[in-house]
Image: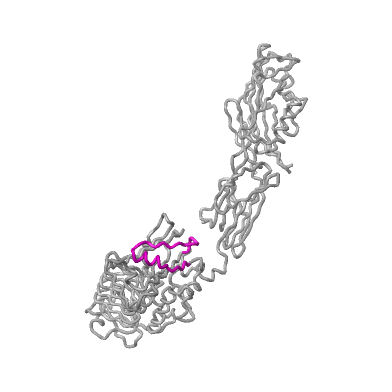
């Protein structure tokens, strides 16, 4: 037998012996109580050291800080010619041929990110005219800000009018880390980057299928775009962060509405809470077509979230528009997002919003503009996260499998999962077994912790292996060793067990009680417990005194209340609490209540013919049957009458006033 868990508490019984007219026993609630013993964002820099085999290794480059190849950290990149008419602020520029149409125009850029190269202007050559060569670079530096491919390129001047050094193109980190030495090769790479994002095969070879959702709009969806209606794209996996949308319209006329306005509204239905990365490919637009954005209503609007809670993407650096063969794009009002168009002439005539990044063939900026600097360029850090690489598809993704199996004493079992917090519907009785089984993968550096109750303390029960995998299984008996709570009212003192028990599990690197520890996964299951309560009388009255053969019985008959739906084996013992007893005389020999007799009520050996306080044999047998072999099915329990509760009154104490303390002791007797 397991060691028993015991609750003791004192009640005070006052006996007033007033001759043959009446005896009263009052049991008061005592204060002596002995409690029962209680048995879940990686941060990756957008620019890193790159050691690609060559400039064509785009799968490597795009996942190592160069999402747009050599153009990744430039606000303006022209593979052939670049021309500006006015001042340009906070723009990093690269151009095969650089030309300025007015005298002493300026280019300004601030190196806000030390991981980005300091050169604000990189060219093959400068136009041989006084306007171009009068261009000022808005900086106090005289080196590390201007680079040219052609030797003998004229030095430009800084804000103070001092000439700046002309560095070689290979000194520009963007070129050297992409294994490029000239603009001709850069032109080829930009063309390859555009084809890379338009190729589903290359995307799938580079990025994990858990990361990319690659979709092509249907004919019906293209008609919705032409009508200016919202197109909905669903994410079957519910959390893919990169959305690649192929929009195979054949002409700009089909892309815009009948009112000649671009109203591209996409709704990405996903469970993502962070802004997704969106790439829009326009593979079929004609190389003779012109996209003229001349309306304040022109918009590329992508939202994300659940069906009933969509959020608009605000950061233009999360949005890339890929035009593979369009002839011309004219910006005359709104800027719509980072544009890569290696075969397209781009004209920026007016802008009512800041520029992020444009990559084109020939770029003409006719107005003064500002950009969002390096933070506005499309170069997502998520591309560099190894978990988003196609190689990660060969590795198990993070997963946890949980099962709780409940087995009753009849051998019948039921099971449920608690991957997320849940409640098992059926209630546990005393001998019902609960088997907890957990299996997890890809939680590197974690241990499994368990907490029963309120998460105030956790116990480590298992560890993950080197790959972050592990498993754990344990058998428990939730109905056993429950801590009892005591309540009382005017008539009864009641002991009862809790209605449920909550078991928590968590995967964490250290004890979850530590405020610095983040749970990488956690869940819980609530176990309903069959009820158990027992109530003992606080008050026993001997109002109708009838002494026969020295014995008197209480009136009304005292009762005990029991609800043992839990089907728990227990022992209830009643003894004398000498410390609470008072009589006249006080000697033990003269007071029947201060004797050595202990009066025991239990479901093992209830009847004791020698007890001064007890039941008849027949009552005892029925009591044993109800408590031990016949679990109660009603939550209200049953009331047992102590019909043969009796008290021996020696003749010499008939007129003696006495107070006796009674000690009730409740014990669990778990199965061995």
Residue lying at 49% horizontally and 70% vertically, measured from the top left: 207
**Residue range (magenta):** 212-240
**Position in image of residue 669 (x %, y %):** 71, 39
Of the 4 image quadrants, the one containing the N terminus is top right
Residue 94 seen in the current view = no
**Position in image of residue 227 (x %, y %):** 34, 64
Of all residues, the one furthest to the left in this rendering is: 103
Query: Does the magenta segment cover residue 32?
Result: no
Query: Does the magenta segment cover residue 224?
Result: yes
Residue lying at 63% horizontally and 41% vertically, measured from the top left: 482
Please give left or right for residue 313 compared with residue 140 in the image.
Answer: right
Residue 539 seen in the current view = yes
Residue lying at 34% horizontally and 70% vertically, measured from the top left: 254
Please give left or right for residue 592 compared with residue 269 in the image.
Answer: right
Observer-nearest of 336 and 249: 249
Residue lying at 39% horizontally and 58% vertically, measured from the top left: 311
């Amino acid at each position: 037998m397991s060691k028993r868990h015991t609750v003791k508490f004192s009640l005070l019984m006052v006996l007033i012996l007033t001759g043959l007219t009446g005896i009263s026993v009052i049991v008061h609630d005592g204060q002596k109580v002995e409690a029962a013993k209680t048995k879940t964002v990686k941060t990756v820099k957008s620019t890193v050291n790159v050691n690609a085999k060559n400039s064509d290794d785009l799968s490597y480059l795009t996942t190592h800080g160069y999402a747009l190849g050599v153009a990744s950290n430039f606000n303006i990149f022209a593979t052939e010619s670049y021309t500006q008419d006015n001042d340009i602020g906070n723009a990093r520029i690269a151009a095969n041929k650089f030309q300025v149409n007015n005298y002493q125009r300026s280019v300004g850029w601030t190196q806000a990110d030390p991981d980005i190269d300091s050169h604000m202007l990189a060219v093959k050559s400068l136009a041989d005219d006084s306007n171009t060569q009068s261009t000022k670079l808005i900086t106090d530096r005289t080196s590390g800000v201007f680079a040219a491919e052609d030797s003998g390129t004229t030095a430009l001047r800084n804000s103070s009018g001092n000439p700046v050094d002309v560095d070689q193109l290979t000194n520009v980190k963007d070129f050297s880390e992409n294994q490029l030495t000239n603009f001709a090769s850069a032109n080829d790479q930009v063309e390859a980057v555009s084809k890379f994002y338009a190729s589903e095969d290359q995307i799938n070879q580079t990025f994990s299928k858990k990361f990319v959702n690659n979709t092509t709009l249907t004919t019906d969806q293209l008609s919705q775009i032409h009508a200016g209606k919202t197109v909905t794209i669903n994410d079957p996996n519910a959390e893919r962060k990169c959305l690649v949308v192929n929009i195979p319209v054949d002409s700009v006329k089909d892309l815009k509405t009948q009112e000649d306005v671009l109203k591209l509204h996409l709704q990405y239905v996903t469970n993502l809470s962070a802004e997704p990365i969106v790439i829009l490919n326009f593979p079929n637009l004609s190389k003779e077509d012109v996209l003229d954005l001349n309306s304040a209503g022109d918009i590329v609007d992508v939202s994300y979230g659940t069906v009933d809670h969509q959020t608009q993407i605000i950061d233009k650096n999360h949005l890339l528009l890929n035009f593979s063969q369009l002839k011309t794009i004219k910006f005359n009002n709104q800027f719509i997002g980072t544009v890569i168009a290696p075969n397209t002439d781009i004209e920026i005539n007016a802008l009512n919003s800041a520029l992020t990044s444009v990559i084109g063939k020939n770029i003409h900026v006719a107005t003064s503009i500002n950009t969002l600097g390096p933070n506005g360029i499309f170069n997502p850090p998520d591309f560099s996260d190894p978990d988003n690489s196609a190689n990660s598809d060969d590795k198990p993704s993070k997963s946890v499998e949980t099962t709780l199996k409940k087995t009753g004493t009849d051998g019948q079992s039921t099971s449920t999962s608690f991957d997320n917090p849940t409640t098992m519907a059926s209630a546990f009785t005393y001998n019902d077994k609960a088997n907890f089984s957990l299996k997890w993968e890809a939680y590197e550096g974690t241990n499994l912790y368990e907490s029963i109750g309120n998460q105030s303390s956790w116990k480590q029960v298992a560890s993950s292996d080197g790959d972050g995998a592990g498993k754990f299984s344990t058998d428990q008996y939730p109905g056993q060793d429950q801590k009892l709570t005591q309540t009382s009212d005017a008539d009864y003192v009641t002991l009862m067990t809790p209605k449920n028990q909550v078991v928590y599990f968590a995967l964490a690197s250290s004890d979850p009680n530590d405020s610095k520890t983040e749970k990488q996964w956690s869940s819980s299951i609530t176990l309903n417990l069959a009820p158990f309560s027992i109530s003992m009388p606080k008050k026993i009255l001997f109002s109708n005194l009838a002494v026969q053969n020295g014995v008197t019985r209480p009136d009304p008959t005292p009762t005990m209340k029991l609800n043992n739906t839990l089907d728990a084996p227990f022992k209830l013992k009643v003894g004398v609490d000498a410390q609470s007893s008072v009589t006249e005389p006080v000697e033990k020999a003269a007071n029947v209540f201060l004797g050595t007799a202990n009066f025991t009520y239990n479901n093992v050996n209830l009847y004791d013919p020698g007890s001064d306080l007890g039941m008849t044999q027949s009552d005892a047998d029925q009591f044993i049957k109800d408590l031990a072999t016949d679990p109660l099915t009603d939550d209200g329990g049953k009331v047992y009458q102590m019909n043969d509760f009796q008290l021996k009154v020696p003749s010499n104490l008939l007129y003696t006033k006495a107070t006796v303390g009674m000690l009730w002791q409740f014990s669990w007797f778990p199965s061995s």
